Image: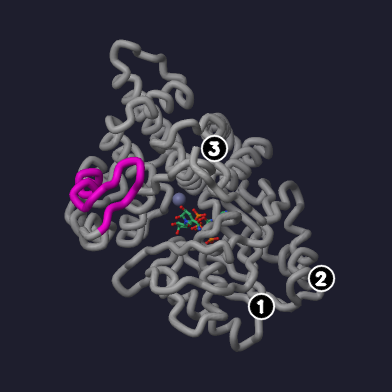
């Protein structure tokens, strides 16, 4: 187990009716907020009215900026920064999923910064300060409600890049599982792939003596495997929705990565796909992750055998452990298929004509490698994308 620092200050307010507390939570930080949200699902469900009423009752002035698209864009981030500066806003409230939250985080670091906010996403600068961000979560998926990351797409060149800073972990996350009843089945499935991918990016490590976090990862994966089919069958099953929502936060708040080296190659590859083709991040992961697994499993067969046996209840084949490992990968793929996700680029209507371009962008023109479980160069990434066709 390697040394680690773990601090997650996000206050989680979980359960039925909790969105009604948003006004009193925000009031502790500010009297004037930017209410930031997506394409309108929150208006259809009535959540928007409940949030605005709660804020008004607490005496908080509301300025709003909706229209965040899935795979959030830099253009709207810059608009948000301008509004906050002009109106003297010092708190951003994101109501929605990873896209609204990530856009809010980017605005939060952009407001006090003199230069171009994209500097933080291309590694040119590190933020020194940020406005506080609060969250009302409507989809368990990205884990952004308690993560120190933001992922934004720059329209010019279609670059999708992430930034990391402890300054952007939300100060609170309000999580009412009832708010997820209205999710279309496909979005529930995409969120599932993302949550499971966040766990697997941490699970696949070459670090030894990680017994506790291995078991925490396995338990969180098994919680998803049990509850997602129930939620798809009964969208308003509170307990299944609650298990999934909490698993989504645990998967990505840093706990499951403690004491181990994480991988993240599949995420890097997926970001190139959603940057160009604008597909849902979770769908892209359902395609990339099994392909990555098939490409790297021989480098640490034991770990893949453990994954198959403990997570998917595959019977151990002592004579041919490789078969056990491969069966684990197949079961993951089968699960993704059963919940309605694509498992090949073709199923997302993506051809093989831009694989080289994606492999190159992902490895900085071939100058860098990605991942830690196995360090992958441009050719490796190309080969994985080929396996995903
Ligand atoms: O935009 P609206 O109208 O709200 O509709 C959204 C959107 O179309 C809809 N939706 C959300 N909650 C709903 C709902 N529809 C009905 N009822 C509800 N309760 O779902 C769609 C997807 O929303 P989005 O916010 O895009 O989903 P998600 O949470 O999966 O976020 C995806 C983004 O997060 C990034 C991804 O790359 C992607 O850009 N990620 C962010 C991370 C982070 N900050 O730590 C880590 C992740 O690995 C990921 O990269
Ligand atoms: Zn993700």
Residue sticking out furthest to the top = 319
Residue 116, quarter of picture: bottom left
Residue 326, quarter of picture: top left
Per the model, the C-alpha gap separating discs 3 and 2 is 36 Å
Magenta segment boundaries in residue numbering: 368-385
- Residue carrying label 3: 232
Q: Which mark is residue 157?
A: none
Vertical order, 205 against 54 (above or below): above
Q: Earlier in the sequence, mark 2 or mark 1?
A: 2
Residue shown at the point (78%, 73%) measured from the top left: 56
- Name the foreground residue: 183 vs 240: 240
Q: Which mark is residue 58?
A: 2
In the rendering, at what x and y percent does residue 96 appear? Answer: 59, 60
Residue shown at the point (45%, 24%) measured from the top left: 312
Residue shown at the point (20%, 49%) measured from the top left: 382
SS at mark 1 in the image: loop
């Amino acid at each position: 187990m390697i040394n680690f620092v773990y601090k997650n200050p996000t206050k989680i307010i979980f359960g039925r009716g909790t969105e009604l507390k948003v006004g009193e939570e925000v009031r502790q930080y500010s009297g004037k907020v930017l209410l930031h949200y997506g394409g309108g699902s929150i208006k259809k469900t009535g959540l928007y009215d409940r949030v605005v009423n709660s804020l008004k009752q607490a005496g908080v002035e509301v300025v709003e900026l909706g229209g965040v698209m899935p795979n959030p864009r830099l253009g709207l981030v810059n608009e948000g920064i301008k509004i906050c500066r002009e109106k003297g806003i010092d708190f951003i409230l994101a109501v929605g999923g990873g896209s609204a939250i990530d856009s809010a985080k980017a605005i939060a670091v952009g407001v006090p910064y003199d230069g171009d906010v994209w500097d933080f996403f291309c590694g040119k600068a590190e933020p020194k300060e940020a406005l506080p961000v609060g969250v009302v979560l409507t989809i368990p998926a990205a884990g952004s409600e308690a993560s120190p990351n933001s992922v934004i797409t720059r329209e010019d060149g279609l670059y999708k890049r992430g930034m990391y800073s402890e300054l952007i972990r939300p100060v609170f996350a309000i999580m009412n599982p009832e708010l997820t009843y209205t999710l279309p089945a496909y979005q529930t499935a995409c969120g599932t792939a993302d949550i499971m991918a966040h766990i697997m990016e941490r699970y696949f490590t070459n670090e030894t003596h990680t017994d506790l976090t291995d078991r925490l990862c396995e338990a969180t994966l098994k919680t998803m495997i049990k509850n997602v089919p129930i939620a798809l069958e009964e969208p308003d099953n509170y307990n299944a929705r609650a298990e999934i929502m909490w698993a989504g936060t645990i998967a990505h708040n840093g706990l499951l990565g403690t004491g181990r080296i994480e991988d993240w190659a599949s995420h890097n590859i997926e970001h190139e796909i959603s940057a160009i083709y604008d597909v849902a991040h979770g769908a892209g992961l359902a395609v990339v992750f099994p392909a990555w697994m098939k490409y790297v499993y021989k480098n640490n067969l034991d770990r893949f055998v453990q994954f198959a046996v403990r997570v998917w209840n595959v019977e151990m084949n002592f004579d041919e452990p490789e078969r056990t490992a491969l069966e684990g990968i197949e079961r993951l793929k089968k699960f993704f298929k059963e919940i309605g996700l694509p498992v090949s680029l073709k199923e997302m209507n993506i051809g093989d004509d831009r694989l080289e371009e994606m492999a190159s962008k992902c490895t900085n023109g071939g100058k860098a490698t990605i991942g830690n479980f196995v360090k992958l160069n441009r050719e490796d990434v190309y080969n994985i994308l080929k396996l995903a066709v």
